[in-house]
Amino acid sequence: MNASASRNPHSATIDAAEVGKFDALAHRFWDAQGEFRPLHMLNPVRARYVADRATLTDARVLDVGCGGGLLCEALVRAGARVMGIDLADGMIEVARLHAAEQSIDIDYRVMDAQALAASEPAAFDVVTCMEMLEHVPQPAITVSTLARLVRPGGSVFISTINRNLKSFLLAIVGAEYVMKLIPRGTHEYDRLIRPAELASWGRAAGLSLRDVAGLDFNPYTEHCRLTHDPSINYIVHLERTGPALPP
């Protein structure tokens, strides 16, 4: 789910250990009751959030850190032309196979977001980056890269996890150690991101914050919904209103 194609483990947008962590689980990505169950629960709400705030019909959309293609497929069904990039080879292989089984046309690439921004700047109407930002070494640089990928007036959507005591207790201790919804060690508290930090990185990169919404899901009822409380999981809508500056 960590997007990048460079094999340099010291890159600002790559953590080789994080890539390996997800690559090892790639074969279980489409098991809705497995390690990626929370993503399957969140995905319809994430996709609807994007569709409600951006025109997707025939839009060129990029999903950075696409994993096995969960969001990519939903966006294609909403009418978009989608490219998905990720560093984890296994994830891209799974994504391609699943898309072929569903007869869905998606351009999947094992590719670095920074390399794509250099070769195709401002090429996308919409850029999404879901549940990835908390896994990269320097998220501010990743946000800057996302800004360079989207056209002026285009939208960037990012979902991640807030950093506070509540999120530590529920998203890490509760989800990983008590309920075992996701593997232990999936998230590191120090890498979690406050909405104000994300908004600040966006402004520095030429992105204006348009909306922040909480993503609340109940693992018992498997119900997920948008809320006004971003204290744990949240999603933001940013718009490119200024020049996309290099990191």
Image (spheres, rainbow, N blue to C red):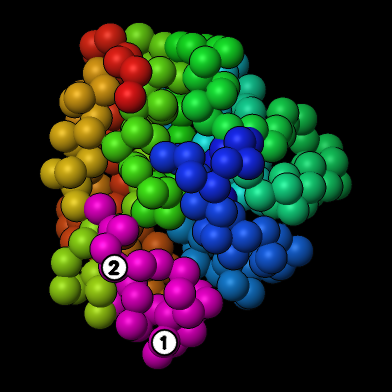
Asked whether 188 falls inside the magenta stretch, the response is: yes
The local secondary structure at tag 2 comes to helix
Q: Disc 1 to disc 2, how far (Cα)?
A: 14 Å
Residue 98 in view here: yes
Residue 197 relative to residue 47: left or right: left
User: Is residue 217 placed above or below 201 in the rendered structure?
Assistant: below
The structure residue drawn at horizontal position 34% and vertical position 42%, both measured from the top left corner, is 139
Determine crowd level at label 1: few under 14, some 14-19, many 20+ residues with C-alpha closer than 10 A.
some
Residue under pointer 2: 189
Q: x and y percent of residue 9 in the render? A: 54, 47
**Residue at 25% over, 79% down:** 169
Q: 100 above or below 171? A: above
Q: Which mark is residue 177?
A: 1
* Towards the viewer: 38 or 8: 8
Q: Is residue 247 above or below residue 170?
A: above
Quick check: is 176 in the magenta stretch? yes
Task: Select label 1 or label 2 by which is in front.
Answer: 2
Left or right of 70? Residue 131 is: left
Amino acid type at mark 1: Tyr
Task: Please state the extent of the stretch shown in magenta in the rendering.
Answer: 170-193
SS label for mark 1: helix
Amino acid type indicated by mark 2: Tyr
Coordinates of residue 63 in the picture (x, y in percent):
54, 35
Indicate the position of residue 239 as horizontal and vertical percent values.
29, 22
